[in-house]
Image (cartoon, rainbow, N blue to C red):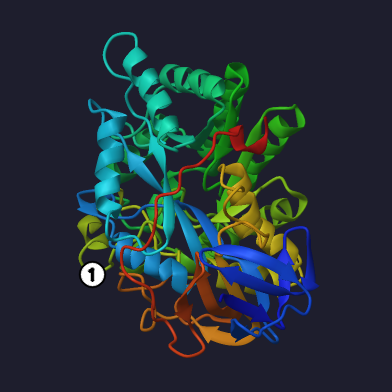
Amino acid sequence: MGTLIKNGTVVNADGSKKVDVLIEGEKIAKIGAGLDPAIHTVVDAANLLVMPGGIDVHTHLDMPFGGTVSADDYTTGTQAAAIGGTTMLIDFALQSPGHTMREAFDTWRKKSDSKACIDFSLHMAVTDLGPGDGSQGLREMEEMVAEGISSFKLFMAYPGVLMIDDGLMFRVMQKAAKLNALCCIHAENGSAIDIVVAQMLAEGKTEPHYHALSRSPKAEAEATHRAIALADMAGAAVYIVHLSNAYALDNLKLMQKRGAKALAETCTQYLVLSIEDQMPGKSWDEAKFVFTPPLREKWNQEPLWQALTDGSLSVVSTDHCPFRFADQKSLGRGNFAKIPNGGPGVENRLQILWHYGVNSGRFRPEKFVELCCTAPARIFGMEYKKGSIKEGLDADILLWDPNTEYTISVATQRMATDYNMFEGWTVKGNAAKVFSRGEIVVDNTAQPGKFLGTTGRGRFVKREVNAGGLS
């Protein structure tokens, strides 16, 4: 006896059709028209779209940063994701300078053990290759791949904390190329930005507004070009995280045209929020929108939307890194450089992208699935398991109601922040029911905003190395 989803329209990245979906155990067992409901529990999906669960490849749960720790742990963060229709996350394990990748891996697995409520994986952020010639760290990269980590994060920002120099970055890229692994890059010229930050603070420009102005889009563009050029030299595949502006996009497209193995994501906030609307320089409340890269001028939004449509940008993620406004963002009162960088978004990614992408006519539901589910699975070595409604894959299934209206608010969210970046926005389209490996974990039609699964049921997913699907 299984669960039979009937009367819905299955939407995959490669097309849509009205068929039934049979779940047996944790897997999608059969897809077809008119499947016999006789011995199964039937879920009526009339007027709903049956899509793969969302995959958010960029989150920061229970992460130390700026003298505090991100507000969502693996329980609240993964529950919030599920309530919004996301059934898989890739979080970041951060190697501390002077420590090993193994220590970082073990630390982040302890953070997730008995807490994760949906499936998850990890990227490894590399800050140190160890003493001497770095051979210890390069061997550790092999160990991480054996553990199912097929992507390595490299920071070109935050000097003295996470930033690495070009030489170390190039060595990691060379090793990643040999392993067929993917390099994920935070592309900003951290050294130049730190000079501008110091100059602004010396001039008394301390308000949140100046955070955005201190991190030039050209600093992101320069680093984007440099990262891809170094990866091209090393023969590595590179994935630029949270690309936020048209200058960086131009450099990405130039290098793609020249044949570099380069992919990139953007994030929900850069598509719909702006300096003009959210950070005009009028109040401390603007600290809610301090994240890195910062918000950009509104004219950058349309090129990003167009790049999602034409394939120059491959994925929409969130960079979910939540901090409470009252007692965490407040650490930076009087000095924007001390405001913890990050914002909450994992619960609202699909709502925002559907409303402003599909409803606005920018792209069809199939493209939505590609950006939020299928491309993330393919690029990050999980398409054997996640990202599509196909027989044999995990039954991570989202029943999406394209007609329901939903007002986003901190009052009803599961995320552990005291604000929402999209407070009061009304969107059309929301998750109706969410299945994680065959188990219904969210039913927003009966119990809105409640996680129905068991805390700790999420599993670590070992990912395959495939150089972002570009090899």
Q: Give how far across and how far down residue 18 sits, in percent.
A: 78, 76
Which residue lies under the disc numbered 1?
326
What residue appears at the point 44 percent right and 16 percent down from the top-left corner?
A: 167
Secondary structure category for the residue under label 1: loop
Look at the image and tell me whether residue 239 can be seen: yes
What residue appears at the point 36 percent right and 70 percent down from the top-left corner?
A: 415
What residue appears at the point 32 percent right and 59 percent down from the top-left corner?
A: 74
What residue appears at the point 54 percent right and 19 percent down from the top-left corner?
A: 178
Residue in the foreground of this view, choosing between 439 and 320: 439
Query: In the image, what residue type sits under mark 1?
Result: Ala
Quarter of the rendering containing residue 47? bottom right
Q: Residue furthest top?
A: 133
Please tell me how crowded label 1 is: few (under 14), some (14-19), or many (20+) other residues with Cα within 10 Å: few
Residue in the foreground of this view, choosing between 346 and 13: 13
Total residue callouts: 1
| Above or below, 125 relative to 174 | below
Q: Give how far across and how far down residue 387 sits, in percent.
A: 61, 56
Look at the image and tell me whether residue 282 can be seen: no
Residue in the foreground of this view, choosing between 66 and 46: 46
Q: Give how far across and how far down residue 95 sits, in percent.
A: 30, 34
Image position of 232 (left or right of 436): right
